[in-house]
Amino acid sequence: YLQSRTDGSPALFTSQKNPEKRLKKTGVQKLLKKLGKEAGVDNVHPHRFRRTTITNALNRGMPVQEVRILAGHSNMNTTMIYFSANKNSIRHSCSKYLSV
């Protein structure tokens, strides 16, 4: 993507109004909020993508230590905040690990 751009800016994302300027955090937040609203999804923000990625990795069985490293957490407890067990994953784990 960066190699195909012709503006010469090192920024990953640039402002639509001022293509020579880097898109700031608030610009990303506003853009995501707008896109979420258009898609009918509430509460869209950058951290939601991070939370979803970490939660999905944990729910799909990625080792928590690897998720911790991927997320850049120094403390395992921080990573575990993202884990949201649901009835299906608990049922699956019970049948996998506890069935006789």
Image (spheres, rainbow, N blue to C red):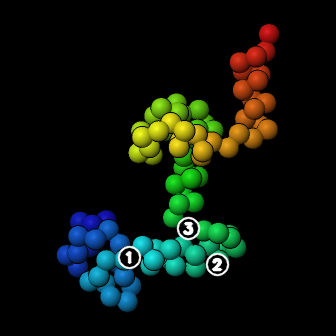
Image quarter of residue 44: bottom right
Question: Sequence order check: which comes first, mark 2 or mark 3?
Answer: 2
Which residue is tagged 3? 45
Q: Secondary structure at mark 2?
A: helix
Horizontally, is 70 left or right of 46 in the view? left
Whether 40 is drawn above or below 88: the answer is: below
- Mark 2 and mark 3: span between their CA atoms? 14 Å
How many numbered callouts? 3
Q: Where does label 2 land, which residue?
A: 38
Please state, as top left, top right, bottom left or bottom right, where the C terminus lies in the image.
Answer: top right
Q: Position of residue 63 (x, y in %)?
A: 52, 30
Say what amino acid the circle numbered 1 marks.
Answer: Lys
Q: Is residue 85 left or right of residue 91?
A: left
Amino acid type, residue under disc 2 in the picture: Glu
- Verify CB contact (< 8 Å) between mark 2 and mark 3: no
Task: Give the numbered dot on residue 49.
Answer: none
- Which mark's residue is nearer the viewer, 1 or 2? 1
Q: Residues within 10 Å of mark 3 (few under 14, many from 20)?
A: some
Residues under labels 1 and 3: Cα distance?
14 Å
Q: Is residue 80 visible?
A: yes
Residue at 44% x, 79% y is 27
Does label 1 or label 3 sit earlier along the sequence?
A: 1
Q: Which residue is mark 1?
A: 24
Tell me the kind of residue under disc 3. His
* Depth order, front residue of 17/51: 51
Is 71 situated left or right of 40 in this image? left
CA gap, disc 1 and disc 2: 21 Å
**Closer to us: mark 2 or mark 3?**
3
